Amino acid sequence: KQKTAYEIPKRDWSSDVCSSDLAILPRFEKLVAAQWPGVPITPTMEAGATDGLYTRLAGIPTYGPNALTEDPNDIRAHGKDERVGVEALYQATEFWYRMLKEFAN
């Protein structure tokens, strides 16, 4: 017999908030300034779900820098025609590559 949602035991998925006093922030600022001079870093909290849930539950502070740019007049998140621009994808991929190199050292 397949369990219904009503029969599945509930689990507390809450986790501690990651610190906003980031010692790693200067490293991000350097990366952003190299690729997008003059663009400020603005910490935000995403309203959606993330796999970071599992690392936070394990006690690992988890941050998700979003390097994708989008036209504020053409946001199609989670629609049937969801997309990002080709140039935005290339720029974000380059940023994430540089970020991984920076933090892997």
Image: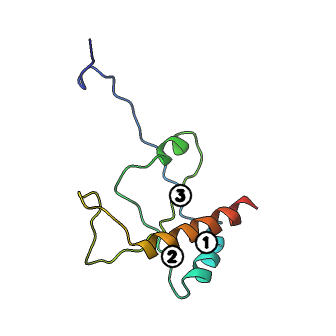
User: Which residue lies at the image location 66% right of the left edge and 71% below the top edge?
Assistant: 27
Check the image and name the residue furthest to the right: 105
Residue 64 locus on image (x, y percent): 51, 59
- When the figure is inspected, residue 6 is found, relative to residue 44, above or below; the finding is above
Image marks 1 and 2: residues in contact by CB distance under 8 Å: yes
Could you say which disc has been placed on residue 79 in the image?
none
Residue 66 locus on image (x, y percent): 47, 66
Hey, which quadrant is residue 5 in on the image?
A: top left
Residue bearing the label numbered 3: 63
Residue bearing the label numbered 2: 41
Residue bearing the label numbered 1: 28
Is label 3 in a helix, a strand or a loop? Answer: loop
- When the figure is inspected, residue 13 is found, relative to residue 48, above or below; the finding is above
**In the drawing, does residue 15 fall left or right of residue 103?**
left
Amino acid bearing label 3: Tyr
Amino acid bearing label 1: Phe
Hey, which quadrant is residue 88 in on the image?
A: bottom left
Q: Which of marks 1 and 2 is nearer the N terminus?
A: 1
Check the image and name the residue furthest to the front: 86
Structural crowding at the residue carrying mark 2, measured as other residues with C-alpha within 10 Å and reported as few (<14), some (14–19) or many (≥20): few
Is label 1 in a helix, a strand or a loop? Answer: helix
Structural crowding at the residue carrying mark 1, measured as other residues with C-alpha within 10 Å and reported as few (<14), some (14–19) or many (≥20): some
Q: Which of marks 1 and 3 is nearer the N terminus?
A: 1
Check the image and name the residue furthest to the bottom: 38
